[in-house]
Amino acid sequence: MDDFLPAYSRTQQPDPAEVVNIVNSTIASANGELRALSLDIHDHPETAFKEKHAHDVLTAFVAERGFTVQKHYLGLDTAWRAEFSYGHGGRVIGINSEMDALAGIGHACGHNLIAAGGVAVALALKQALVQTNTAGKVVLLGTPAEEGGGGKVILLERGGYTDMDVCVMSHPMGGPVEGSVAIGSSSAIQTIDVEYTGHTAHAAAAPWEGTNALDAAFIAYSSIAVLRQQMKPECRVHGRIGGKDWLPNVIPDNAALTWIVRAPTNEEVTDLMERVRACFDAAALATGCKISVKYGVPYSQLVPNPALALEFVKVANREYKMEAFKAGTSASTDFGNVSFELPSLHPNYAIPTEANGGNHTAAFAKSARTMEAHDLAMKVAKALAITAYKVVKDDAFYEEVKSSFKATKATRC
């Protein structure tokens, strides 16, 4: 099984049965409450930076279970931090719980499962530290706006991850093998907002007096469509067009576009972005419109820590019979930026879905509410908690984690 991960050799040290039992029993005893928490978040979908209900129910949940909570963390109204320390010193494990939904289709990326799964990891790790008398700290971050806005990037820039030795989270996906886990990279991403400003005119009486902003948007869209012929297969460019007060008998004086550029690495995104920007500028020139451009928060590609990944896969397979694959995704996550700064792990796990019902569909939102999806989220949470405990307890393993982080420096560019 190890051959699907980056080459890494070490003497295997099985996880103590005691720790496995603590993790399993802790999550099992809280399972009903974790399920209710997930459903509550699922049934109250909130978009980026508006996750007020999720913020409140999650912070209340962990505060009642012995965590010290900071609400509205680091100036973000819906971010939060919950921590638990045991003993003196020890390593710090970071965990992320995402919360945001998608406009119109709710939790179609399963962030309700991510939120509850992060809480489950934190609860299990807390009990493992206490019951084995192991010094350490658990830090659970509630991270807003993964779907757009880069909540983790903002928290990272403001010091939210500074004290962490490693950070972990997980994500549900559709997949060819239900109940499997996948370790791999994700695409780097750059969002760009473009506005064209023209001049209105009567579309029949005097169209020559107008400057058509919709024409600019159409030319830009068409130019990007043509550009795709010369794009590498692993790159993506996609977007939408909108406008205000458009009428069929008025030359439109405004058009607003939001586009997303993805590629395997930050460097490749930068190169592709230059070509996409040329399409926008050319459209403005061709139509005589004014152009305004605003770049969003860039997301880096995900770089899983090889040592953490290998240990997690062994635990997931040995304890929970989960098959593992090396498989990246052309989707993107702001957790990629976190993986550039400290050893990190972000396994994806396949939940049961209907045909053509993968992430970002209404069907996936239904799948993210099923008991089967919840059970898989809890299995992954257990494997992550056991892996994280080893980071705290095993000095030699933590040195390997640090060494493998240094060894992957070349891929973080």
Image (cartoon, helix red, strand yellow):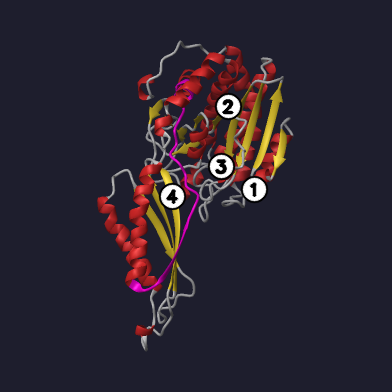
How many residues crowd mark 1 within 10 Å: few (<14), some (14–19), many (20+)?
A: some
Find the magenta span and give its range. Answer: 287-311
3D distance between C-alphas at marks 2 and 4? 28 Å
Magenta span has 301?
Answer: yes
Q: Nearer the viewer, residue 412 or 181?
A: 412
Task: Name which residue type carries label 4.
Answer: Gln
Give residue 152's mark: 3
Q: Which of marks 3 and 1 is nearer the N terminus?
A: 1
3D distance between C-alphas at marks 3 and 2? 16 Å
Q: Which quadrant of the figure has residue 138?
A: top right
Q: What element carries label 1?
A: loop
Q: Are marks 2 and 1 in contact (CB under 8 Å)?
A: no
In this view, 267 is above or below 26:
below
The percent position of residue 30, horizontal first and vertical second, equals 65, 29
Q: Earlier in the sequence, mark 4 or mark 1?
A: 1
Q: Which of marks 2 and 4 is nearer the N terminus?
A: 2
Q: Mark 1 points at which residue?
A: 76
Task: Name which residue type carries label 2.
Answer: Asp
Q: Which of 398 and 385 is in front in this view?
A: 398
Q: Name the residue under label 2.
A: 165
Task: Give the quadrant of the C terminus.
Answer: top left
Task: Name which residue type carries label 3.
Answer: Lys
